[in-house]
Image (tube, coloured by chain):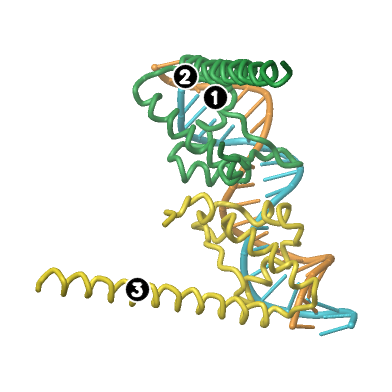
Chain colours: A green, B yellow, C cyan, D orange
Amino acid sequence: MTLDPSYKTKKVITIGIVSELTGLSVRQIRYYEERKLIFPERTERGSRKFSFDDVERLMDIAAKREEGVQTHEIRQDYMRELRKEEYKKIRQKMLQGQINAQFGVSKNR
Amino acid sequence: MTLDPSYKTKKVITIGIVSELTGLSVRQIRYYEERKLIFPERTERGSRKFSFDDVERLMDIAAKREEGVQTHEIRQDYMRELRKEEYKKIRQKMLQGQINAQFGVSKNR
DNA sequence: CGTGTAAGGAATTCTGACACG
DNA sequence: CGTGTAAGGAATTCTGACACG
């Protein structure tokens, strides 16, 4: 269970540098946010801040866009992935619950 | 041997955000660069870019400054640390050389 | 749909300098 | 020595809109 290295998820990179890092135009990056493909945070006065995770995701998006995949498809695929992750976690929890129950019963008998 | 996670050393953070992250004023950060305590990179037009490593180092510097340590002392201590690291690496290499020599000899006999 | 661009304003960053101490 | 500040300029970022397609 890796605790977030935090460097990867902390939102600290401005859009200009993200543009350099990804090769995308700032216009494209803003548009992908509008289409809810990425979720930068904002500084007090409204400037976008991105994480390295966002940068990687943008490179992923760029690759898909080059294949002609539309933004709404990219978003749907992404949400499906998230769902799968959720199920995994839930299954994991239920299993853990059963294990705990087993132990609980055998201990209290 | 951990290969640089690169998130930690990549220079992508602007001075304003570093200021928020560290609680230092941009004036202080610029001054510490002037005193050669940190070494940000520059964008094409000259804006400073820092890494998470730099941010951590700045928090370290801030702590020492609060203890009244002067910038030139902080720099000296830092260079001593770097020297020690160097020695370690060299010792390591020499040791490895001896080991290799041992193996070479025994194999060729 | 996805991206470029000009528009106008606000905030950022830069450097060199003066101030205080 | 270490840090604040006002100064002037350049570059960044933001939003909403028009353009093309």
Q: Quadrant where the N terminus of chain A lies?
A: top right
Label 2 sits on residue: A74
**Who is closer to the viewer here, A55 or C20?**
A55
Q: Going 53% across and 47% down the picture, which residue do you hit?
A: A17
Counting from the top left corner in percent of width and height, residue B24 is at: 75, 61
Q: Which amino acid does label 2 sit on?
A: Ile
Whether residue A42 sits left or right of residue D19 in the image: it is right
Instruction: For marks 1 and 2, give the CA distance.
Output: 8 Å
| Above or below for A14 versus A92 | below
Disc 3 element = helix
Going from N to C along the chain, the mark reached first, 1 or 2, is 1
Label 1 close to label 2 by CB (< 8 Å):
yes
Q: Mark 3 lies on which chain?
A: B
Counting from the top left corner in percent of width and height, residue C10 is at: 76, 43
| Above or below for D11 versus C14 | above
Whether residue B63 sits left or right of residue B8 in the image: it is right
Q: Going 72% across and 62% down the picture, which residue do you hit?
A: B26
Label 3 sits on residue: B93
Instruction: For marks 3 and 1, give the CA distance.
Output: 48 Å
Label 1 sits on residue: A37
Residue B58 figure quarter:
bottom right
| Above or below for B64 versus B5 | below
Counting from the top left corner in percent of width and height, residue A82 is at: 54, 20
Q: Quadrant where the C terminus of chain A lies?
A: top right
The residue at the far front in this view is A109
